[in-house]
Image: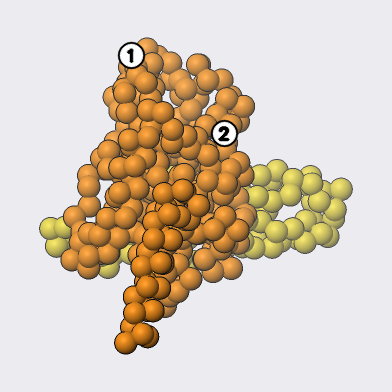
Chain colours: A orange, B yellow
């Protein structure tokens, strides 16, 4: 009798304590339970051979896209007859740190956009050229080339001000159970990241290496492609490419990965 | 074939063993897959790679369908004299890509 009473007291105490912690913001924020010192890039979850591929710019097939991106950067396109370089000059200087800040709120379109959409915005507005299709070789190449200029810099997305609503929607997406398996992103990448799934380690789900070359794909792919794969893996219907739901999630993931270095173009299994 | 990345020293001492690393962009379609309509996708792979050094063949490779897309190749040769190292990839459609690197031997 007294044992039962004390255990229920303990439960209530823990519940109240938990609520107090979450109200005061002392406890781990939802979707961000991994401690800063435990935060690990997906790089540390892949095999030594795959890591070696990423470390050597010549063995890293992502650099084939980078090379192509560099060419596109210098080639004029569209009715305006301008190239990226005409406005932004040399990418290593002008694009340094840009990818680390994306996704970001864009006042012109009034919502949070990712790097791919920013590039396409430039194409439409400045170059007066048709937007590049999502996941097309050209868009991946240009995104990889721009993101490479931030390699090694810490991911630092802004989530305050006008980006807040998008960020919270992204967090909700991360925590939402979905698909026939009824799993949320957090259940694998937050609660069970130290463990194995089908013989492979579960990563923490950081997007700091994207666009990345995945050996499984045999090609470079965007973070949205990776997110779609996760959706399909839990048997959920993926959103279309460029969906705001993914952009919101990308923003949340960027905040969650804050401080990790940009690794684009990363190599993953 | 579009892009190739090559790394090898452009200067070497006579008799030095130099490493040549190459990476080329290619789909390496195996020929065993089918498209969404169930039709077989024809094989389209790089089937041959030849490297010559001042006209003399120093390395050759035959490629097969099990080789991954965007194949990476690394091999060694001995720097004998100043000249050109020419690398050539040939694929199933008969397309060839040639890259040349000049090496100065002292």
Most extreme residue toward the top is A80
Residue in the picture at 53% in, 20% down: A88
Residue behind mark 2: A97
Q: In the image, is residue A22 above or below residue A45?
A: above
Mark earlier in primary sequence (1, 2): 1
Q: Which mark is residue A79?
A: 1
Q: In the image, is residue A239 above or below residue A190?
A: above
Residue in the picture at 57% in, 55% down: A36
Residue in the picture at 30% in, 49% down: A172
Residue A99 x/y as whole percent? 50, 36
Q: Which mark is residue A226?
A: none
Residue in the picture at 14% in, 62% down: B38
The C terminus of chain A lies in which quarter of the figure?
Answer: bottom left
Chain of the residue where label 1 is placed in the rendered structure: A
Horizontally, residue A103 falls left or right of residue B60, namely: left
Marks 1/2 same chain: yes
């Amino acid at each position: 009798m007294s044992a039962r009473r004390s255990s229920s007291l303990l439960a209530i105490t823990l519940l109240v304590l938990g609520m107090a912690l979450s109200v005061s913001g002392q406890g781990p924020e939802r979707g961000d339970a991994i401690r800063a010192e435990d935060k690990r890039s997906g790089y540390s979850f892949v095999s030594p051979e795959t890591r070696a591929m990423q470390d050597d710019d010549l063995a890293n097939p992502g650099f084939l896209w980078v090379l192509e991106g560099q060419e596109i950067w210098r080639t004029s396109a569209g009715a305006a007859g301008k190239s990226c370089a005409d406005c932004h000059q040399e990418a290593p200087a002008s694009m340094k740190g840009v990818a680390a800040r994306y996704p970001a709120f864009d006042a012109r379109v009034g919502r949070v956009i990712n790097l791919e959409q920013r590039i396409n915005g430039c194409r439409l507005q400045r170059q007066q050229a048709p937007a590049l299709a999502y996941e097309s070789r050209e868009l991946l190449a240009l995104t990889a080339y721009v993101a490479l200029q931030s390699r090694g810099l810490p991911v630092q997305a802004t989530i305050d001000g006008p980006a807040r609503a998008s960020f919270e929607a992204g967090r909700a997406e991360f925590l939402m159970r979905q698909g026939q398996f009824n799993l949320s992103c957090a259940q694998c990448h937050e609660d069970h990241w130290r463990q194995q799934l089908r013989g492979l380690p579960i990563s923490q789900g950081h997007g700091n290496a994207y666009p990345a070359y995945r050996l499984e794909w045999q090609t470079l792919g965007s973070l949205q492609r990776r997110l779609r794969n996760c959706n399909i893996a839990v048997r959920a219907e993926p959103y279309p490419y460029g969906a705001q739901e993914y952009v919101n999630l990308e923003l949340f993931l960027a905040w969650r990965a804050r401080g990790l270095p940009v690794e684009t173009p990363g190599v993953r299994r | 074939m579009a892009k190739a990345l090559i790394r090898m020293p452009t200067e070497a001492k006579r008799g030095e063993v130099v490493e040549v690393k190459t990476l080329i962009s290619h789909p390496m379609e195996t020929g065993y897959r089918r498209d969404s309509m169930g039709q077989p996708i024809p094989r389209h792979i790089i089937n041959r790679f030849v490297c010559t050094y001042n006209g003399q063949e120093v390395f050759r490779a035959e490629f097969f369908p099990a080789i991954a897309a965007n194949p990476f190749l690394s091999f060694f040769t001995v720097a004998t004299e100043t000249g050109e190292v020419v690398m050539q990839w040939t694929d199933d459609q008969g397309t060839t890509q040639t890259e040349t690197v000049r090496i100065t031997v002292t």
